[in-house]
Image (spheres, helix red, strand yellow):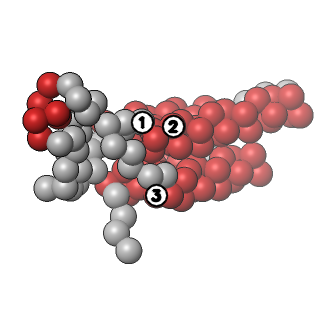
């Protein structure tokens, strides 16, 4: 089973969401632990999302969905407890940095080209494995 670089980046982001806030701010409460689980599930989503030819945003959308879900957990926390903790703010920042990193990192063995029928992609036959 091969893992994409995007999956590794998302998994690393999940580890950072779990480790950095307790080290810098303080212990995690229940909502913060839920955020760790959500971002960890995001790693599975990124791994499970297919690389669509000529469209490289599928894995980005999976990562952003996990970050937005963590934001919804923070919103629910504000509604229930009346405040969003500093730990959650740091987790949200790390989650969105992770989503940007997932977008930025390229998967090895996949060349992104223009849409078929346009430019060099038409001459080369579209994306190809290296």
Does residue 46 sit above or below 69 in this rendering? below
Query: What residue is pinned by disc 3?
Result: 47
| Marking on residue 8 | none
Left or right: 56, with 32 as reference point: left
- The answer, for residue 36, to whether it is visible in the render is no
Q: Residues within 10 Å of mark 2 (few under 14, many from 20)?
A: some
The x, y position of residue 36, in whole percent, is 62, 52
Query: What residue is pinned by disc 1?
Result: 57
Secondary element type, mark 3: helix
N-term-proximal mark, 1 vs 3: 3
| Marking on residue 61 | 2
Does residue 107 sit above or below 100 in this rendering? below
At 75% across and 46% down in the image, what residue appears?
A: 31
* C-alpha gap between disc 1 and disc 3: 13 Å
At 62% across and 34% down in the image, what residue appears?
A: 68
At 23% across and 50% down in the image, what residue appears?
A: 110
CB within 8 Å, label 2 to label 1:
yes
Q: Nearer the viewer, residue 11 or 59?
A: 59
CB within 8 Å, label 1 to label 3:
no
At 86% across and 34% down in the image, what residue appears?
A: 81
Q: Quadrant of the N terminus?
A: bottom left
The x, y position of residue 9, in whole percent, is 38, 51
Secondary element type, mark 2: helix
CB within 8 Å, label 3 to label 2:
no
The x, y position of residue 12, in whole percent, is 42, 54
């Amino acid at each position: 089973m091969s893992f994409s670089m995007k999956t590794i980046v998302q998994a690393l982001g999940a580890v950072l969401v779990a480790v950095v806030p307790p080290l810098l701010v303080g212990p995690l409460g229940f909502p913060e632990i839920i955020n760790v689980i959500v971002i960890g599930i995001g790693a599975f989503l990124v791994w499970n999302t297919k690389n669509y030819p000529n469209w490289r945003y599928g894995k980005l959308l999976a990562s952003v969905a996990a970050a937005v879900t963590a934001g919804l957990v923070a919103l629910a926390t504000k509604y229930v407890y009346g405040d969003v903790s500093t730990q959650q703010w740091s987790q949200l920042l790390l989650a969105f940095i992770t989503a940007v990193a997932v977008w930025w990192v390229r998967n090895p063995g996949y060349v992104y080209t223009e849409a078929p029928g346009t430019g060099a992609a038409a001459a080369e036959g579209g994306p190809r494995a290296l």
